[in-house]
Amino acid sequence: MPAAVKTDPGSVMLFKAATLAVPPILKNTFTVGPLPDHIAWNSDCTMIATANEGEGVYDSSLVDPEGSVSIISGITPSGAGGTVTTVNFAPVAATDAGLIAAGVHLPLELNAQVYYDDNSGECASKLDFGTSRAAYTPATQLEPEWVAWSADESKLYVNLQENSAIITIDVATATAEKIDALDLKDWSSAGGTAGIDTVKDDACTLAFKPGFKAMRMPDSIAVYSAGGQDYIITANEGDDKEYGDFEEKQKFKDVITSCSSTPDFKNDFDEFSFLNAQVGTDAC
């Protein structure tokens, strides 16, 4: 459960199951990372993994803790004992540039915060990222949503929804080993779908959109094994970030101005060409 202050370390609480005659009884409490979003037991119920989302909170300024995973091991059948090891993501998130080069989406990287604070005519008077900038690490941009054990339970797969990526953790060493960005979803005829409906007209008309790709941003994941190989199934919900007057998502009509080069979009949009002055700059 989250702390009273959302950005502080959260808790995992173990209860003895309730019966009709006896209410649930608290057996143990463990301190984990900020905002534990999802927990997963291993197969013999001796270990728990938690996805600590570390979601930021904007009041007068942004406070944004690091995302992490906590592994609780050594839990006895009675619910006693247990040791918490919290895995940080520094080994796979050394720099913003490295994450971006690997295809990992960063909703509000450090350079963006500096831009909005100091250079944006639209946003500078509305936003204050000073607190976040002072405590910034690339791991503050990574937000675990879901965690799943590998088939042999030697690994944990950690879904980062807002980043459209998955981190692999070695359980024995409690170390983040790698981060893999999920590829973009292709909405052209080559993308393996029946198309997408992008027209607000109360109808559901699927059509291919050449050149249009979207981030998957899955919410939950599941793991199954076949032939000794783990496979990860993702539920691609999509998501975005909002902090104060900052809003990551934008409508096509707000960032598109000419469709002459892509006539397939003409039924949906009056204009089609990306404006650098609007995309990823003044998102307030």
Image (tube, grey):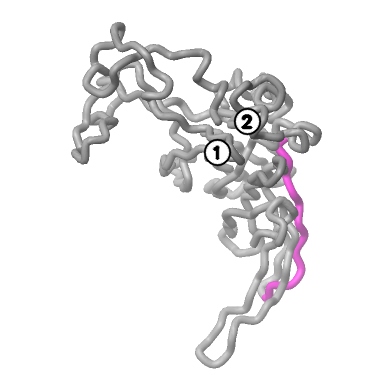
Asked which secondary structure carries label 2, the reply is loop
Pick whichever, 227 or 1, lies toward us.
1
The amino acid at mark 2 is: Leu
Asked which secondary structure carries label 1, the reply is loop
**Residue 103's quadrant in the figure?**
top right
**Residue 126's quadrant in the figure?**
top right
Q: Which residues are magenta?
A: 78-89
Whole-percent x and y of residue 64? 70, 42
Circle 1 residue: 241
Whole-percent x and y of residue 187? 31, 25
Pick whichever, 71 or 97, lies toward us.
97
Q: Are marks 1 and 2 in contact (CB under 8 Å)?
A: yes
Q: CA distance from mark 1 to mark 2?
A: 8 Å
**Residue 112's quadrant in the figure?**
top right
Is 4 placed above or below 236 here? below
The residue shown at (41%, 27%) is 214
The residue shown at (54%, 28%) is 283
